[in-house]
Image (cartoon, rainbow, N blue to C red):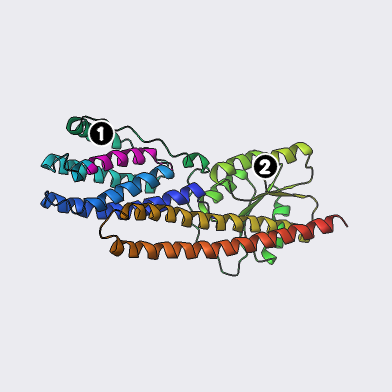
Amino acid sequence: MNEATFESELRYTFLAETSEMLDDAESIFMHLESTPKDLSKLPKLLRIMHTIKGSGATVGYSEIGNFTHKFETLLVAIRDQKIETSEEIIDLLLVSNDCLKKCIAILQKDLKSKLAHLIETEKKIDDVLSEKLHTKVKNISQNSFENDIVKEKKSTINQTENSQNSKGNILICDDDEELLETISEMLQIENYNVTACNQATTALEILKNQNVDIILTDLKMPGMDGLEFTKKIRNLNIYIPIVFISGNISREHIKQFLRFGVSDFIDKPFTSDGLILVAERAMRTAHFWRELLTISKSCFKIFVFIQKIDALLSDKHKDILLSGERDILKECLAEIQRTTSRLLEVEKDTQSSFIKASAEDTK
């Protein structure tokens, strides 16, 4: 499964969409600078800021949400001719747009970056609104959706996609070199791409830099044991299936497995068939999460575009402008339809597999 998480994928989608919108906004501000009395393009600017405000707050960027909220208030005041488009005001609009573009550039490098540079410009907007309108715009509340998004550190994927015939990428960590080689051979015969290492610290570095679908790890290892290794994995990726390999698994271990989201475990000694069955179950889980991530991204794109359409309803040229947005919505809906079908197939295959495995265990 890709290292990027649900939260990260949504944020990258937001950054890509916002970057395009800010480019459009910049051209409008440049036009306004040359013809300050022409306010015909302000409705489009308001749509852009409204969309960035809503989607920024949704993905957890409250600083951007609050900034664009005040930026939008300033634009409304200009549209309603409560504030004149003086040279000072136009300079403030250009600086504000540049601040947002700088946000995007910073966040594309590190999704968790602080956006302290917004404070100075936000204060200038506050001062203008206070002076011209005799009002102070409060910060908007942080969208509660952020609390429902899984938190996770950014990790980079540098490894290129493996061959189409591969069943997936498995990372194995075990200090027993002989067992490591045996497991690798068993899985490679079944056409899995296998990366093997004998230390948890090495495995963590691999996980940061390669595309790994599932992890198999020994429970007892020198230095960092399997449980500590699992904690650190979950700091990088909370979705990736983890399978423990051990010859002495206690009830207390099982409780800890559940707590840390361990997908499965294999008792030593094990057969090739047993190993392959567990690997296939874990790989189905990885594919399931990947499909959920795809459909979640599509839903978020729809959320962004619905905001645009909502803002367009008041535009007298809405019929022309809506045609492009509708095409994008159709594309997203088609993607959701395809992904939903794949999810249903994955669920059906998973249920069938577990029913078969349970029947064999009762024999």
Q: Residue furthest right?
A: 363
| Residue marked by disc 1 | 120
Give the vertical position of 136 relative to 64 (above or below). above
Q: Residue at x 21, y 41 (%)?
A: 77
Eye-nearest disc, 2 or 1: 1
Q: Main secondary structure of the magenta part?
A: helix
- Toward the viewer: 87 or 15? 87
Q: In the rendered structure, which amino acid carries the disc numbered 2?
A: Gly
Where residue 212 appears, x then y in whole percent? 57, 55
Task: Specify the label residue 226 is tagged with.
Answer: 2
Give the vertical position of 241 relative to 332 (above or below). above
Where residue 153 appears, x then y in whole percent? 49, 43
- Toward the viewer: 336 or 92? 336
Residue 62 in magenta? yes
**Circle nearer the N terminus (2, 1):** 1
Residue 118 relative to residue 299: left or right: left
Q: Quadrant of residue 362?
A: bottom right
Residue 182 shows up from this direction: no
Q: In the rendered structure, which amino acid carries the disc numbered 1?
A: Glu
Q: Quadrant of residue 301?
A: bottom left
Residue 150 shows up from this direction: yes
Q: Secondary structure at mark 2?
A: helix
What span is colored magenta in the figure? 59-76
